[in-house]
Image (tube, grey):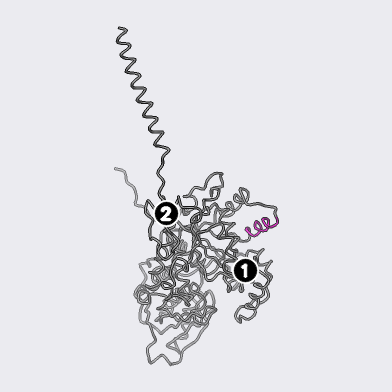
Amino acid sequence: MQKKRWIALAALRKVLTCAICSIALVALFSVHVPVFPSSKVPNFSDPFKLPTKLSAEQSWTLELAPPHLLKAPLPSRKLDGSSGTVETDKLWKPPPNRDFVPCVEPSPNYTSPTESRGYLLVHTNGGLNQMRAGICDMVAVARMLNATLVIPELDQRSFWKDSSNFSNVFDEDHFINALANDIKIIKKLPKELATGPRAVKLFRSWSGMNYYQDEIARLWEEYEVIRASKSDSRLANNNLPLDIQRLRCRACYEALRFSPQIEAMGKLLVNRMRSFGSYIALHLRFEKDMLAFSGCTQDLSSAEADELRIIRENTRYWRDKEINPMEQRSRGFCPLTPKEVGIFLSALGYPSSTPIYIAAGKIYGGDSHMADLRSRYPILKSKETLASVEELEPFTNHASQMAALDYIVSVESGVFIPSYTGNMARAVEGHRRFLGHKKTISPDRKALVGLFDKLEQGTLEEGKNLSDRVIEIHRKRQGSPRKRKGPIAGLKGKEKLRSEEPFYENPLPDCLCRKEFPVQTTL
């Protein structure tokens, strides 16, 4: 009996010994995590040869890149205001779209274009996105007037002096064919009418259906050709028939496609940005023309401020010549400076490893004004750093075409942030809303200025307190679905119409509908 006990005890000892050895081996191997050799760290020093997609191994090695390639993320805050490490999905997750989807199909009563009453010539004005909105509006106007639209002329005389014509920027044939069931579009006037008499008219701003079908349509009695001398803001934002509103959306988001050359280059830039991971497109309106126009001088030297003042005084069609920069800024009428943008992004919780695409023209002051933003976010890219001189050569010196590249990269970004509410910001935000309410963070500049001033005065420091306040201010400014805002109460006339939210900034409710789910039946 005792012998059996000794045999059992010996067996138990062997089992325990094996178990202890197994645990020791597991512990030994667990501390020897393999480290990829430095030769496998992807070299991003040559921006012209960026991979279009990271492999699983490259994703690992990117995390292990040395500090000179990628700084370690700074401690940050969650977007919900709680303490701890930033949750990546919170930073990049779009707002709930509440099942809104595009609905731009015409109603059952919508008919194909009937016999044209005449020809509509259009001279667009402004920069790329101002012209885009004007072109789409003139498509709707041509439908109202039962007119044949001649391919619009692009503005070649504005600040940018861009010589591009319609086919250089847009896919002309696609535009004509995509709208064939709505209006007739031709590339040129018939020869017999090219030099004939025409009515040249500045259409009234923010006009409705009655204005065009009554007052403007009367011009057909004397003329075969009506020329619209400007196209911006000539059509009301609201109170138009649903079929007209949906036609504007079809024109903007389906028919008015960029030229194949621009589309191809834009997609290449998008792929190169995505090789760094999810990215922010920052529309940084810190360009010479914007600062001169707005009269904003924050973070500028006295010499720079004087240069901009002279530009403003010598630009004939800019009405406001004398501007108080401090008052402009306190009212939120100034674009955020690069330094302020850096503080803003840090407060929202975006780590320094966040890739940022600068969607803008030449930044005023160059590196001297970008240094602070770059020190916080070293992965700053632009079309000029993502593409070679040879790749960009066809678009260089053509402001509209370069802006179109920025537009494509901005629409496709994980997050879009404009530093100022201009035509580009409104157009991109509207397009992102149309595509499913992709995340767009609109800075509350008036509220932010107060916080930035406190930082300068030393009464507030960067950290949890600032982060909590910035996050709370912007909780409902991330592009979630909402109806387009109407006019500000108390205003009248043009000022009332001017105060409405632009149609192309938010196409809801006209062009977005709730998705209809099939009825569930139980057997």
Image position of 36 with respect to 340: above or below: above
Dot 2, how many residues are within 10 Å of its Cα: few (below 14), some (14-19), or many (20+)?
some
Image position of 80 with respect to 69: above or below: above
Q: Position of residue 181 (x, y in %)?
A: 34, 74
User: How far apart are labels 2 and 1 at the CA level?
Assistant: 60 Å
Residue at the outermost top position: 1
Q: Is residue 26 left or right of residue 339?
A: left
* Depth check, front residue: 92 or 230: 92
Q: Position of residue 523 (x, y in %)?
A: 29, 42
Looking at the rendering, in which quadrant would you find the N terminus? Answer: top left
* Residue 476 seen from this side: yes
Residue 456 within the magenta-colored segment of the rendering: yes
Image position of 418 with respect to 190: above or below: above
* Depth check, front residue: 175 or 304: 304
Q: Magenta part mainly helix, strand or loop? A: helix
Q: Is residue 113 left or right of residue 464?
A: left
Q: Which residue is mark 1?
A: 491
Q: Which residues are magenta?
A: 447-457
What amino acid is labelled 2 in the image? Val
Q: Which residue is mark 2?
A: 41
Q: Residue at x 33, y 21 (%)?
A: 14
* Depth check, front residue: 119 or 446: 446
Q: Position of residue 391 (x, y in %)?
A: 41, 72
Q: Which tag is nearer the camera, tag 2 or tag 1?
A: 2
The disc, 2 or 1, on the residue closer to the chain's N-terminal end is: 2
